[in-house]
Image: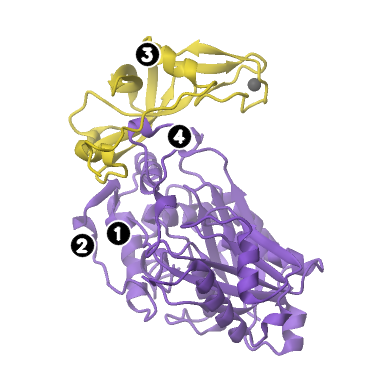
Chain colours: A purple, B yellow
Amino acid sequence: MRGRVVIAGIGHTAFGRLPGRSPTSLNVEAVRAALEDAGIGKDAVDGLFVKFPTSTFEFMYGQTVAEALGIQPRIGGVWDQGGAANIAMIGFAAMAIEHGQCEVAVVTFADNPKSGTRQAYEKAWGHDEVYGWFGVAPGYAMIARRHMGQYGTTSDQLGAIAVACRGHGAANPQAQLRQRLTLDQYRAARMIASPLRRDDCCLVSDGGAAVVLMSAARARALGVARPVPILGFGQGQTSWEVAQRPDLTTTAAAISAQTAFAMAGIAPSQVSVAQIYDCFTITVLMTLEDYGFCRKGEGGRFVEGGRIAFGGELPVNTSGGLLSETGMPGLQLVVEGVRQMRGTANLQVPNARFCAVSNQGGVMHTHATLILGQE
Amino acid sequence: MNADQAPFPLPLPDAVSAPYWQALSQGRLTFQRCARCGGAWLPPRPECPHCLSADWAWEDAGGRAKLISWVVYHVAYHPAFADRLPYNVAVVELAEGPRLISSIVGIDDAETLRIDQALTLAIGQEHGVAVARFRPD
Ligand SMILES: [Zn+2]
Protein backbone atom coordinates (compact mmCIF):
# COMPACT_ATOMS: atom_id res chain seq x y z
CA MET A 1 0.00 0.00 0.00
CA ARG A 2 3.08 2.20 -0.39
CA GLY A 3 1.97 5.71 -1.33
CA ARG A 4 -1.72 4.84 -1.65
CA VAL A 5 -2.69 6.85 1.44
CA VAL A 6 -1.69 10.48 1.84
CA ILE A 7 -1.57 13.09 4.54
CA ALA A 8 -3.90 15.67 3.04
CA GLY A 9 -3.95 18.21 5.83
CA ILE A 10 -1.97 19.32 8.87
CA GLY A 11 -2.87 21.63 11.72
CA HIS A 12 -1.73 22.67 15.15
CA THR A 13 -2.45 25.13 17.93
CA ALA A 14 -0.05 27.53 19.56
CA PHE A 15 2.54 25.79 21.75
CA GLY A 16 3.52 26.74 25.29
CA ARG A 17 1.43 27.75 28.27
CA LEU A 18 -2.22 27.99 27.26
CA PRO A 19 -4.17 28.49 30.49
CA GLY A 20 -7.90 28.04 30.34
CA ARG A 21 -7.75 25.74 27.30
CA SER A 22 -8.94 22.16 27.79
CA PRO A 23 -7.37 19.31 25.81
CA THR A 24 -10.70 18.87 24.03
CA SER A 25 -10.77 22.50 22.93
CA LEU A 26 -7.16 22.23 21.73
CA ASN A 27 -8.06 19.06 19.78
CA VAL A 28 -10.91 20.88 18.08
CA GLU A 29 -8.67 23.81 17.14
CA ALA A 30 -6.00 21.50 15.72
CA VAL A 31 -8.54 19.47 13.73
CA ARG A 32 -10.20 22.66 12.43
CA ALA A 33 -6.82 23.84 11.17
CA ALA A 34 -5.99 20.47 9.60
CA LEU A 35 -9.35 20.30 7.79
CA GLU A 36 -8.90 23.86 6.49
CA ASP A 37 -5.40 22.94 5.32
CA ALA A 38 -6.79 19.90 3.47
CA GLY A 39 -9.59 22.04 2.07
CA ILE A 40 -12.36 19.70 3.19
CA GLY A 41 -15.32 19.93 5.55
CA LYS A 42 -15.67 17.98 8.77
CA ASP A 43 -18.60 15.95 7.44
CA ALA A 44 -16.22 14.00 5.22
CA VAL A 45 -14.43 12.63 8.30
CA ASP A 46 -15.51 9.07 9.09
CA GLY A 47 -12.46 7.92 11.08
CA LEU A 48 -11.25 9.60 14.27
CA PHE A 49 -8.12 8.39 16.06
CA VAL A 50 -7.21 10.17 19.30
CA LYS A 51 -4.22 9.88 21.62
CA PHE A 52 -5.59 10.52 25.08
CA PRO A 53 -4.19 13.41 27.11
CA THR A 54 -1.66 12.30 29.71
CA SER A 55 -2.59 15.07 32.11
CA THR A 56 -6.13 13.81 32.56
CA PHE A 57 -7.50 10.36 31.90
CA GLU A 58 -11.10 10.02 30.79
CA PHE A 59 -12.95 6.93 29.59
CA MET A 60 -14.28 7.04 26.00
CA TYR A 61 -12.30 10.17 25.28
CA GLY A 62 -12.53 9.53 21.53
CA GLN A 63 -16.27 10.03 21.77
CA THR A 64 -15.77 13.22 23.77
CA VAL A 65 -13.62 14.64 20.96
CA ALA A 66 -16.04 13.40 18.29
CA GLU A 67 -18.91 15.12 20.07
CA ALA A 68 -16.95 18.36 20.33
CA LEU A 69 -16.25 18.08 16.59
CA GLY A 70 -19.90 17.28 15.89
CA ILE A 71 -19.04 14.20 13.83
CA GLN A 72 -20.19 10.57 13.89
CA PRO A 73 -17.16 8.48 12.86
CA ARG A 74 -17.49 4.90 11.62
CA ILE A 75 -14.20 3.84 13.15
CA GLY A 76 -11.72 5.14 15.71
CA GLY A 77 -11.20 5.66 19.41
CA VAL A 78 -8.35 6.26 21.80
CA TRP A 79 -5.02 4.53 21.53
CA ASP A 80 -2.39 4.27 24.26
CA GLN A 81 1.25 3.58 23.51
CA GLY A 82 2.57 6.68 25.20
CA GLY A 83 4.37 8.88 22.71
CA ALA A 84 4.43 6.23 19.97
CA ALA A 85 0.66 6.42 19.66
CA ASN A 86 0.43 9.23 17.11
CA ILE A 87 2.37 7.53 14.33
CA ALA A 88 0.90 4.17 15.36
CA MET A 89 -2.57 5.65 14.82
CA ILE A 90 -1.53 7.06 11.45
CA GLY A 91 -0.57 3.52 10.47
CA PHE A 92 -3.85 2.08 11.72
CA ALA A 93 -5.80 4.84 9.99
CA ALA A 94 -3.95 4.22 6.72
CA MET A 95 -4.77 0.52 6.93
CA ALA A 96 -8.41 1.32 7.70
CA ILE A 97 -8.59 3.54 4.61
CA GLU A 98 -6.82 0.95 2.45
CA HIS A 99 -9.33 -1.71 3.52
CA GLY A 100 -12.50 0.31 3.19
CA GLN A 101 -13.18 0.78 6.89
CA CYS A 102 -13.26 4.55 6.46
CA GLU A 103 -12.47 7.12 3.78
CA VAL A 104 -11.19 10.20 5.57
CA ALA A 105 -9.43 9.79 8.90
CA VAL A 106 -8.29 12.37 11.41
CA VAL A 107 -5.49 11.63 13.86
CA THR A 108 -5.35 14.14 16.68
CA PHE A 109 -3.67 14.78 20.00
CA ALA A 110 -3.83 17.63 22.49
CA ASP A 111 -2.84 18.02 26.11
CA ASN A 112 -2.29 20.69 28.75
CA PRO A 113 0.33 19.37 31.17
CA LYS A 114 1.96 22.80 31.51
CA SER A 115 -1.03 24.76 32.76
CA GLY A 116 -2.83 21.66 34.07
CA THR A 117 -1.59 18.65 36.03
CA ARG A 118 1.73 16.91 35.40
CA GLN A 119 1.01 13.99 37.68
CA ALA A 120 1.23 11.39 34.95
CA TYR A 121 4.83 12.39 34.31
CA GLU A 122 5.94 11.93 37.89
CA LYS A 123 4.66 8.48 38.76
CA ALA A 124 6.80 6.00 40.62
CA TRP A 125 8.31 3.11 38.73
CA GLY A 126 7.04 -0.31 39.82
CA HIS A 127 7.56 -1.24 43.43
CA ASP A 128 10.92 0.42 43.70
CA GLU A 129 9.89 3.70 45.30
CA VAL A 130 11.73 2.68 48.46
CA TYR A 131 15.01 3.18 46.58
CA GLY A 132 13.90 6.56 45.29
CA TRP A 133 13.27 5.29 41.74
CA PHE A 134 10.92 7.97 40.43
CA GLY A 135 10.51 10.03 37.31
CA VAL A 136 10.82 9.70 33.56
CA ALA A 137 14.17 11.47 33.05
CA PRO A 138 16.01 9.05 35.37
CA GLY A 139 14.74 6.11 33.30
CA TYR A 140 16.36 7.60 30.22
CA ALA A 141 19.43 8.53 32.25
CA MET A 142 19.80 4.85 33.22
CA ILE A 143 19.89 3.93 29.53
CA ALA A 144 22.22 6.83 28.65
CA ARG A 145 24.73 5.80 31.32
CA ARG A 146 24.85 2.26 29.97
CA HIS A 147 25.34 3.60 26.44
CA MET A 148 28.22 5.77 27.67
CA GLY A 149 29.80 2.81 29.42
CA GLN A 150 29.39 0.43 26.49
CA TYR A 151 30.32 2.73 23.64
CA GLY A 152 32.16 5.71 25.09
CA THR A 153 29.35 8.11 24.27
CA THR A 154 30.02 11.47 25.89
CA SER A 155 27.98 14.17 27.52
CA ASP A 156 29.16 16.61 24.84
CA GLN A 157 27.73 14.33 22.16
CA LEU A 158 24.34 14.43 23.88
CA GLY A 159 24.83 18.17 24.07
CA ALA A 160 25.36 18.36 20.30
CA ILE A 161 21.80 17.05 19.85
CA ALA A 162 20.37 19.68 22.17
CA VAL A 163 22.39 22.41 20.44
CA ALA A 164 21.09 21.36 17.00
CA CYS A 165 17.42 21.14 18.03
CA ARG A 166 17.54 24.40 19.95
CA GLY A 167 19.10 26.11 16.96
CA HIS A 168 16.24 24.93 14.77
CA GLY A 169 13.68 25.99 17.36
CA ALA A 170 15.23 29.44 17.66
CA ALA A 171 14.56 29.91 13.94
CA ASN A 172 10.93 28.77 14.26
CA PRO A 173 8.53 31.65 15.05
CA GLN A 174 6.00 29.14 16.42
CA ALA A 175 8.40 27.40 18.80
CA GLN A 176 7.82 27.51 22.54
CA LEU A 177 11.53 27.96 23.34
CA ARG A 178 13.29 30.25 20.88
CA GLN A 179 16.66 30.34 22.58
CA ARG A 180 19.85 29.08 21.02
CA LEU A 181 22.05 26.90 23.16
CA THR A 182 25.83 26.67 23.07
CA LEU A 183 27.77 23.63 24.15
CA ASP A 184 29.24 25.68 27.01
CA GLN A 185 25.75 26.60 28.20
CA TYR A 186 24.77 22.96 27.92
CA ARG A 187 27.73 21.90 30.07
CA ALA A 188 26.98 24.57 32.67
CA ALA A 189 23.31 23.70 33.11
CA ARG A 190 22.34 21.77 36.22
CA MET A 191 22.16 18.02 36.35
CA ILE A 192 18.65 16.56 36.59
CA ALA A 193 19.51 12.89 36.81
CA SER A 194 23.14 12.33 35.97
CA PRO A 195 24.21 11.86 33.22
CA LEU A 196 21.26 13.93 31.92
CA ARG A 197 21.28 17.70 32.32
CA ARG A 198 18.47 20.21 32.03
CA ASP A 199 18.87 20.69 28.30
CA ASP A 200 18.80 16.96 27.62
CA CYS A 201 15.14 17.02 28.69
CA CYS A 202 12.20 18.09 26.54
CA LEU A 203 9.83 20.92 27.27
CA VAL A 204 6.49 20.58 29.02
CA SER A 205 3.86 22.09 26.78
CA ASP A 206 0.19 22.72 26.25
CA GLY A 207 -0.99 22.38 22.69
CA GLY A 208 -2.44 20.16 20.03
CA ALA A 209 -1.82 18.90 16.51
CA ALA A 210 -3.84 16.93 13.97
CA VAL A 211 -3.46 15.37 10.53
CA VAL A 212 -6.04 14.35 7.91
CA LEU A 213 -5.56 11.10 5.96
CA MET A 214 -7.28 9.84 2.82
CA SER A 215 -6.47 7.73 -0.20
CA ALA A 216 -4.30 9.31 -2.88
CA ALA A 217 -7.19 8.78 -5.32
CA ARG A 218 -9.59 10.58 -3.03
CA ALA A 219 -7.15 13.45 -2.59
CA ARG A 220 -6.89 13.81 -6.38
CA ALA A 221 -10.67 13.72 -6.75
CA LEU A 222 -11.10 16.37 -4.07
CA GLY A 223 -8.35 18.52 -5.50
CA VAL A 224 -6.31 18.48 -2.28
CA ALA A 225 -3.57 21.01 -2.88
CA ARG A 226 -0.53 19.43 -1.25
CA PRO A 227 -0.97 15.73 -0.44
CA VAL A 228 2.07 13.97 1.01
CA PRO A 229 2.17 10.22 0.40
CA ILE A 230 2.78 7.79 3.24
CA LEU A 231 5.41 5.42 1.90
CA GLY A 232 5.95 3.26 4.93
CA PHE A 233 5.20 2.76 8.58
CA GLY A 234 6.09 0.33 11.30
CA GLN A 235 6.04 -0.30 15.01
CA GLY A 236 8.17 -2.03 17.60
CA GLN A 237 7.75 -2.66 21.31
CA THR A 238 9.39 -4.12 24.34
CA SER A 239 7.41 -5.06 27.41
CA TRP A 240 10.35 -4.98 29.80
CA GLU A 241 10.74 -2.15 32.26
CA VAL A 242 14.18 -0.56 32.17
CA ALA A 243 15.47 -2.69 35.04
CA GLN A 244 14.35 -5.91 33.35
CA ARG A 245 15.31 -5.11 29.77
CA PRO A 246 17.95 -7.62 28.64
CA ASP A 247 19.71 -5.03 26.45
CA LEU A 248 19.43 -1.40 27.53
CA THR A 249 21.06 0.10 24.48
CA THR A 250 19.13 -1.42 21.56
CA THR A 251 15.52 -0.41 21.29
CA ALA A 252 12.28 -1.29 19.57
CA ALA A 253 13.15 1.45 17.08
CA ALA A 254 15.20 -1.13 15.18
CA ILE A 255 12.31 -3.46 14.30
CA SER A 256 9.98 -0.50 13.75
CA ALA A 257 12.36 1.04 11.23
CA GLN A 258 12.99 -2.28 9.46
CA THR A 259 9.25 -2.65 8.90
CA ALA A 260 8.81 0.93 7.74
CA PHE A 261 11.84 1.06 5.43
CA ALA A 262 10.94 -2.31 3.88
CA MET A 263 7.42 -1.07 3.18
CA ALA A 264 8.75 2.16 1.70
CA GLY A 265 11.32 0.29 -0.36
CA ILE A 266 14.08 2.72 0.52
CA ALA A 267 17.27 2.65 2.60
CA PRO A 268 18.14 5.06 5.42
CA SER A 269 20.91 6.46 3.21
CA GLN A 270 18.23 7.88 0.89
CA VAL A 271 16.71 9.93 3.70
CA SER A 272 17.98 13.48 3.81
CA VAL A 273 15.81 14.94 6.59
CA ALA A 274 14.47 13.29 9.73
CA GLN A 275 12.19 14.18 12.61
CA ILE A 276 13.42 12.04 15.49
CA TYR A 277 11.48 11.94 18.76
CA ASP A 278 13.62 13.88 21.23
CA CYS A 279 11.96 13.52 24.60
CA PHE A 280 15.58 13.25 25.76
CA THR A 281 18.77 13.66 23.74
CA ILE A 282 19.77 10.03 24.26
CA THR A 283 16.58 8.97 22.46
CA VAL A 284 17.72 10.72 19.29
CA LEU A 285 21.20 9.24 19.46
CA MET A 286 19.93 5.68 19.89
CA THR A 287 17.12 6.04 17.35
CA LEU A 288 19.64 7.19 14.71
CA GLU A 289 21.64 4.02 15.44
CA ASP A 290 18.64 1.72 15.49
CA TYR A 291 17.30 3.20 12.24
CA GLY A 292 20.57 2.42 10.53
CA PHE A 293 21.77 5.98 9.90
CA CYS A 294 24.94 4.82 11.62
CA ARG A 295 26.10 1.67 13.34
CA LYS A 296 25.23 0.75 16.92
CA GLY A 297 27.58 2.59 19.23
CA GLU A 298 28.47 5.25 16.67
CA GLY A 299 25.54 7.56 17.38
CA GLY A 300 27.70 9.84 19.49
CA ARG A 301 30.21 10.46 16.72
CA PHE A 302 27.39 10.71 14.17
CA VAL A 303 25.70 13.69 15.84
CA GLU A 304 28.94 15.64 16.25
CA GLY A 305 30.25 18.32 13.94
CA GLY A 306 26.88 19.74 12.94
CA ARG A 307 25.84 16.68 10.92
CA ILE A 308 22.26 16.80 12.29
CA ALA A 309 21.95 20.59 12.22
CA PHE A 310 20.33 22.46 9.33
CA GLY A 311 22.87 22.51 6.53
CA GLY A 312 24.39 19.24 7.73
CA GLU A 313 24.23 15.83 6.13
CA LEU A 314 21.03 14.79 7.95
CA PRO A 315 19.15 17.69 9.53
CA VAL A 316 17.08 16.41 12.44
CA ASN A 317 14.06 18.09 14.02
CA THR A 318 14.06 21.03 11.67
CA SER A 319 11.30 22.85 13.58
CA GLY A 320 12.96 22.35 16.97
CA GLY A 321 11.58 19.04 18.16
CA LEU A 322 10.37 18.31 21.67
CA LEU A 323 13.46 20.06 23.02
CA SER A 324 12.52 23.41 21.53
CA GLU A 325 9.33 23.61 19.43
CA THR A 326 6.95 21.90 21.84
CA GLY A 327 7.22 19.05 24.33
CA MET A 328 4.01 17.58 22.95
CA PRO A 329 4.61 13.92 22.29
CA GLY A 330 5.15 13.51 18.62
CA LEU A 331 2.44 14.59 16.22
CA GLN A 332 4.16 17.93 15.56
CA LEU A 333 7.11 15.94 14.19
CA VAL A 334 4.78 14.46 11.57
CA VAL A 335 3.47 17.94 10.79
CA GLU A 336 7.03 19.16 10.20
CA GLY A 337 7.78 16.08 8.10
CA VAL A 338 4.80 16.94 5.89
CA ARG A 339 6.02 20.54 5.53
CA GLN A 340 9.47 19.28 4.49
CA MET A 341 7.94 17.04 1.81
CA ARG A 342 5.73 19.88 0.59
CA GLY A 343 8.70 22.21 0.43
CA THR A 344 7.11 24.67 2.85
CA ALA A 345 9.18 24.18 6.00
CA ASN A 346 10.64 27.15 7.84
CA LEU A 347 14.08 25.57 7.55
CA GLN A 348 13.49 23.78 4.27
CA VAL A 349 16.01 21.08 3.40
CA PRO A 350 16.68 21.43 -0.32
CA ASN A 351 15.92 18.46 -2.56
CA ALA A 352 14.72 16.25 0.30
CA ARG A 353 12.80 13.37 -1.28
CA PHE A 354 12.11 11.33 1.82
CA CYS A 355 11.56 12.17 5.47
CA ALA A 356 11.72 9.64 8.31
CA VAL A 357 9.69 10.48 11.41
CA SER A 358 9.94 8.63 14.71
CA ASN A 359 7.66 8.52 17.72
CA GLN A 360 8.34 6.59 20.91
CA GLY A 361 6.73 6.12 24.27
CA GLY A 362 7.36 5.13 27.86
CA VAL A 363 11.07 4.76 28.52
CA MET A 364 11.82 3.44 25.04
CA HIS A 365 9.07 0.84 25.47
CA THR A 366 7.14 1.59 22.29
CA HIS A 367 8.22 2.92 18.94
CA ALA A 368 6.57 3.86 15.66
CA THR A 369 8.13 5.00 12.38
CA LEU A 370 6.67 6.91 9.45
CA ILE A 371 8.33 7.38 6.05
CA LEU A 372 6.97 10.26 4.02
CA GLY A 373 7.68 10.99 0.38
CA GLN A 374 6.66 13.39 -2.35
CA GLU A 375 3.86 13.28 -4.86
CA MET B 1 5.25 19.33 51.60
CA ASN B 2 8.75 18.88 53.03
CA ALA B 3 10.69 15.74 53.80
CA ASP B 4 9.49 15.66 57.41
CA GLN B 5 5.83 15.68 56.47
CA ALA B 6 5.93 13.44 53.43
CA PRO B 7 5.23 9.81 54.21
CA PHE B 8 8.19 7.73 53.12
CA PRO B 9 7.17 5.52 50.16
CA LEU B 10 7.62 2.10 51.72
CA PRO B 11 6.80 -1.14 49.88
CA LEU B 12 3.24 -2.40 50.08
CA PRO B 13 3.69 -6.19 50.05
CA ASP B 14 0.89 -8.24 48.51
CA ALA B 15 0.22 -11.98 48.52
CA VAL B 16 2.94 -12.63 45.96
CA SER B 17 5.64 -10.23 47.17
CA ALA B 18 5.24 -10.59 50.97
CA PRO B 19 7.69 -13.54 51.19
CA TYR B 20 10.30 -11.47 49.30
CA TRP B 21 10.18 -8.65 51.82
CA GLN B 22 9.99 -11.05 54.75
CA ALA B 23 13.10 -12.90 53.56
CA LEU B 24 14.97 -9.60 53.22
CA SER B 25 14.05 -8.77 56.81
CA GLN B 26 15.70 -12.08 57.75
CA GLY B 27 18.86 -11.20 55.85
CA ARG B 28 18.18 -13.15 52.65
CA LEU B 29 17.65 -11.79 49.15
CA THR B 30 15.38 -14.19 47.28
CA PHE B 31 14.11 -14.58 43.75
CA GLN B 32 11.64 -16.88 42.04
CA ARG B 33 12.66 -19.93 40.00
CA CYS B 34 10.28 -21.80 37.72
CA ALA B 35 9.87 -25.53 38.43
CA ARG B 36 8.94 -26.18 34.83
CA CYS B 37 11.49 -24.25 32.71
CA GLY B 38 14.11 -23.24 35.27
CA GLY B 39 13.71 -19.53 34.50
CA ALA B 40 14.56 -17.12 37.30
CA TRP B 41 13.11 -13.68 37.89
CA LEU B 42 12.38 -10.59 39.93
CA PRO B 43 10.30 -8.61 40.79
CA PRO B 44 7.82 -11.06 42.31
CA ARG B 45 4.99 -12.14 40.04
CA PRO B 46 2.54 -15.04 40.16
CA GLU B 47 3.46 -16.64 36.82
CA CYS B 48 6.77 -17.41 35.15
CA PRO B 49 7.28 -14.76 32.45
CA HIS B 50 9.22 -17.32 30.37
CA CYS B 51 6.78 -20.28 30.19
CA LEU B 52 3.74 -18.90 32.09
CA SER B 53 3.81 -21.72 34.64
CA ALA B 54 2.50 -20.97 38.11
CA ASP B 55 4.70 -23.73 39.56
CA TRP B 56 7.72 -21.97 41.04
CA ALA B 57 9.64 -21.64 44.30
CA TRP B 58 11.66 -19.01 46.15
CA GLU B 59 15.42 -19.38 46.03
CA ASP B 60 18.13 -17.55 47.97
CA ALA B 61 20.50 -15.35 45.98
CA GLY B 62 24.19 -15.88 46.68
CA GLY B 63 24.81 -12.14 46.90
CA ARG B 64 27.15 -11.82 43.91
CA ALA B 65 26.03 -9.32 41.32
CA LYS B 66 27.12 -6.79 38.71
CA LEU B 67 26.22 -3.21 37.96
CA ILE B 68 24.19 -2.83 34.75
CA SER B 69 23.70 0.93 35.04
CA TRP B 70 23.03 3.71 37.51
CA VAL B 71 21.81 7.27 37.77
CA VAL B 72 22.49 10.03 40.26
CA TYR B 73 19.43 12.07 41.21
CA HIS B 74 20.02 15.80 41.49
CA VAL B 75 16.30 16.55 41.56
CA ALA B 76 13.87 14.98 44.03
CA TYR B 77 10.79 13.55 42.32
CA HIS B 78 9.39 12.70 45.75
CA PRO B 79 9.70 15.03 48.74
CA ALA B 80 10.90 12.20 50.98
CA PHE B 81 14.16 12.15 49.00
CA ALA B 82 14.79 15.90 48.93
CA ASP B 83 17.31 15.85 51.76
CA ARG B 84 19.29 12.96 50.26
CA LEU B 85 20.31 14.65 47.03
CA PRO B 86 22.42 13.64 45.30
CA TYR B 87 21.56 9.95 45.65
CA ASN B 88 22.02 7.02 43.31
CA VAL B 89 19.66 4.35 41.96
CA ALA B 90 21.08 1.36 40.13
CA VAL B 91 20.04 -1.58 37.99
CA VAL B 92 21.79 -4.64 39.38
CA GLU B 93 22.01 -8.13 37.87
CA LEU B 94 22.35 -11.04 40.25
CA ALA B 95 24.80 -13.82 39.36
CA GLU B 96 21.71 -16.05 39.13
CA GLY B 97 20.24 -13.80 36.40
CA PRO B 98 17.38 -11.73 37.83
CA ARG B 99 17.73 -7.95 37.75
CA LEU B 100 16.45 -5.48 40.30
CA ILE B 101 16.40 -1.80 41.15
CA SER B 102 18.74 -1.04 44.02
CA SER B 103 21.23 1.50 45.28
CA ILE B 104 24.99 1.37 45.68
CA VAL B 105 26.54 2.01 49.11
CA GLY B 106 30.09 2.22 50.38
CA ILE B 107 31.23 4.77 47.80
CA ASP B 108 32.20 8.43 48.00
CA ASP B 109 31.24 9.46 44.49
CA ALA B 110 28.78 7.51 42.37
CA GLU B 111 30.22 9.09 39.22
CA THR B 112 33.29 6.87 39.64
CA LEU B 113 31.33 3.61 39.31
CA ARG B 114 31.72 1.53 36.15
CA ILE B 115 29.23 -0.55 34.21
CA ASP B 116 29.53 -4.30 34.78
CA GLN B 117 31.46 -3.63 38.00
CA ALA B 118 31.29 -6.55 40.49
CA LEU B 119 29.01 -5.97 43.48
CA THR B 120 28.10 -7.74 46.70
CA LEU B 121 24.78 -7.67 48.48
CA ALA B 122 24.65 -5.35 51.49
CA ILE B 123 21.18 -5.48 52.99
CA GLY B 124 20.30 -2.16 54.58
CA GLN B 125 17.43 -0.61 56.50
CA GLU B 126 15.05 2.03 55.20
CA HIS B 127 12.59 3.37 57.75
CA GLY B 128 12.58 -0.03 59.47
CA VAL B 129 12.23 -2.03 56.27
CA ALA B 130 15.06 -4.24 54.99
CA VAL B 131 16.12 -3.33 51.45
CA ALA B 132 18.59 -4.92 49.02
CA ARG B 133 21.51 -2.57 48.55
CA PHE B 134 24.90 -3.46 47.05
CA ARG B 135 28.50 -2.38 47.53
CA PRO B 136 31.39 -2.59 45.06
CA ASP B 137 33.80 -5.48 45.69
ZN1 LIG C 1 8.89 -21.14 33.41
Say above or below: A310 vs B8. Answer: below
Label 2 chain ID = A
The local secondary structure at tag 1 comes to: helix
**Residue labelled with disc 4:** A243
Image check: A166 left or right of B59? Answer: left
Q: Is mark 1 within 8 Å of ligand 1?
A: no
Q: Residue A134 location in percent, x, y?
A: 37, 41
Task: Name the N-terminal-most of marks 1 and 2.
Answer: 2
Q: Quadrant of residue A7?
A: bottom right
Q: Compared to A35, does B42 lie above or below?
A: above
Is disc 4 in contact with disc 3, using a CB cutoff of under 8 Å?
A: no
User: Are labels 4 and 2 assigned to the same chain?
Assistant: yes
Mark 2 vs mark 3: in front: 3
Q: Secondary structure at mark 2?
A: helix
> Which amino acid, by three-letter code, is at mark 1?
Asp
| Quarter of the image where ligand 1 sits | top right
Quick one: label 4 or label 1, which is nearer the N terminus? 1
- Nearer the camera: disc 1 or disc 2: 1
How far is mark 4 from mark 3, CA to CA?
Answer: 23 Å
Does residue A357 appear left or right of residue A149 in this picture?
Answer: right
Tell me which numbered mark, 4 or 2, is placed earlier along the sequence: 2
Tell me how far mark 3 sits from mark 1, CA to CA.
Answer: 41 Å
Residue that numbered label 1 is attached to: A199
**Amino acid type, residue under disc 2 in the picture:** Gln
- Residue type at the position of mark 4: Ala
Would you name the residue on which mark 2 appears? A185
Viewer-side residue, A17 vs A300: A17
Quarter holding the N terminus of chain B is top left
Q: Residue furthest right?
A: A100
Q: Mark 3, mark 1: which one is toward the viewer?
A: 3
Q: Are marks 4 and 1 in contact (CB under 8 Å)?
A: no
| Residue sitting at x 47%, y 78% | A349
